[in-house]
Amino acid sequence: MSDSPDPLRAQLVRILDWEESHVGFDKAVDGIPAGTRGAQAHGFEHSPWQLLEHMRLAQEDILDFCVNPKYVHELKWPDDYWPTPAPPDAKAWGAGVAAFKADREKLKGLARDQKDLFALVPTGKGQQTYIRAILLIADHNSYHLGQLVAVRRALGAWK
């Protein structure tokens, strides 16, 4: 839970990693054998590695958008958000998981500490508010976590 007395902020912090209606990130990425991380199951478009990196890249980009006053959107959709199927080396999986978790903690901090969650993000366009960004990443991650679990099941790598 959050230490915030504001129920909305507390809920935003919880939604970033809750396991109330689906598997959370930590369980979804835990225990995937190294040889399975870059595997593509029949009928599935992405490997576990691609899903992890896609979530990490999108979350990192949205966080940067919210906190970097000099943010410039440089990644091209969809190519720059989807890596090759296999991790580039043995350390990449652990580094990706750690980076995702670190950025998730920073997003929780944003939910707790941003003065006005309904304020427009200065580098954004239109109605791009802080609360929109937080909800966008929660929704995005939830969608891809479901895909990750389905891919793991198809690969025989889910308990």
Image (spheres, rainbow, N blue to C red):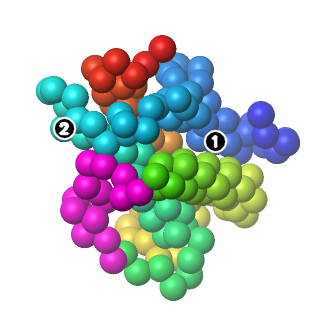
Viewer can see residue 150: no
**According to the image, label 2 marks what residue?**
45
At 59% from the left and 20% from the top, the residue drawn is 20
State which quadrant residue 47 falls in: top left
Q: Is residue 79 magenta?
A: yes
Q: Amino acid at mark 2?
A: Glu
For label 1, the SS is helix
| Image location (x, y in percent) of residue 107 | 62, 55
Is 143 positioned to the left or the right of 68 in the image?
left
For label 2, the SS is loop
The correct choice, above or below, for 64 with respect to 11 in the image is: below
State which quadrant residue 118 falls in: bottom right
The correct choice, above or below, for 156 with respect to 39 in the image is: above
The correct choice, above or below, for 68 with respect to 1 in the image is: below
| Image location (x, y in percent) of residue 89 | 41, 57
The correct choice, above or below, for 96 with respect to 147 in the image is: below
Q: Residues within 10 Å of mark 2 (few under 14, many from 20)?
A: few
